[in-house]
Image (tube, rainbow, N blue to C red):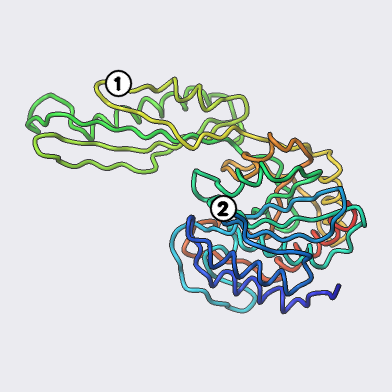
Amino acid sequence: MNRIPGASAEQLLHDLVSIASPSCQEAEAARFLTGWMREHGYDEAYVDEVGNAVGRIGSGPRQVVLLGHIDTFAGFPPVRQEGRLLYGRGAVDAKGPLCTFAVAASRAKLASDVQVIVLGAVEEEAATSRGARYALTQYKPDFCVIGEPSRWDRITLGYKGRLLLDWRWEGGLSHSAGEAPSPAERALSYWQEIKMHCEHHNQNIDSLFARLGASVRDINTWQKGVNGVAQMTVGFRLPPGIEPETIAEKFPAQDGATVSARGAERAFTGDRNSALCRQFRRAIRRNGGKPRFVYKTGTSDMNVVGPGWACPIVAYGPGDSALDHTPDEHIHLDEYGRAIDVLTMALATI
């Protein structure tokens, strides 16, 4: 198998970032990536029935799944390159890691008993995680790597859980000079209850990963005939040990409001002493880095597949996650290249 030159690897990333693929609109990007895989030594490459881009190299009994995601956050800032920096939606989150997977799998000298599956999953940025949930039913990997930015020399071992609560109140309006709370005040009262609960829970907890987090995702009020309406979505970030169901029960609907829960995911952490993690640490050192571990306060497809696959699992990929979803999202192409080298070495030694 021919080594893919660095310029070709960079062109793949540039081309994939140049294709807009927000959640539920990934088809063009998936077709492009599978076409690239077929042209670069993959044994098979196709778009599966839910829209995931799938590529396979090798046919051995030991299966390594590299699960990235091909969808991006909304918005499409102009794609441009300034020096060694590539700007564009998905450059970091998470087409950079996904292209790292695609190139490294093609470069690696795999053991004869290993097959590598590269997945560009759909709808990771949505609460549905449709691509990962489908993959969960299709594969039984011995090892799994999730494609998320962590810098080339860091290994992500865990993600917090998540819960979204959609709160809504509708009722008769009263004069603003009266004593009855307005629809907006009712929403803020519900939020204040949640905020106070989190502050009480987090007393004497310093670790961000161990803290219970909550934020107002959306809040709107409007008039509907003689009624007023307030609507709000609250997002929770759940540490290990707190179940989504517990949070949903703790903040029920009151005073005529309704509350519905969605997007529930439990926190998940991998084993830092697994064989997979050891191979990544060794590969980072051999490429001149000092490996470090990360536990993230967001969620990823690790939350979806980790419990079901129950195999050694880490998240890895180039890029600064602080740039996720921002208008200034960009990746350093030298870091992208180093991440490819690390993953290529790790795959060859599994």
Q: For marks 2 and 1, give the CA distance.
A: 39 Å
Residue 62 picture location, percent across and down: 86, 48
Q: Which of the two marks, 2 or 1, is nearer to us in this view? A: 2
Q: Quadrant of the N terminus?
A: bottom right
For marks 2 and 1, the one nearer the N-term is 2
Residue 67 picture location, percent across and down: 68, 52
> What residue is disc 2 on?
50
Q: Residue at x 70, y 64 (%)?
A: 45
Q: Nearer the viewer, residue 89 or 44?
A: 44
Q: Residues within 10 Å of mark 2 (few under 14, many from 20)?
A: some
Q: Is residue 65 above or below residue 288?
A: above
> What residue is disc 1 on?
254
Q: Residue at x 47, y 73 (%)?
A: 78
Mark 1 element type: loop
Which three-letter amino acid code belongs to the residue tagged 2? Answer: Val
Q: Residues within 10 Å of mark 1 (few under 14, many from 20)?
A: few
Mark 2 element type: loop
Q: Are marks 2 and 1 in contact (CB under 8 Å)?
A: no
Q: Residue at x 62, y 29 (%)?
A: 240
Q: Residue at x 60, y 61 (%)?
A: 92
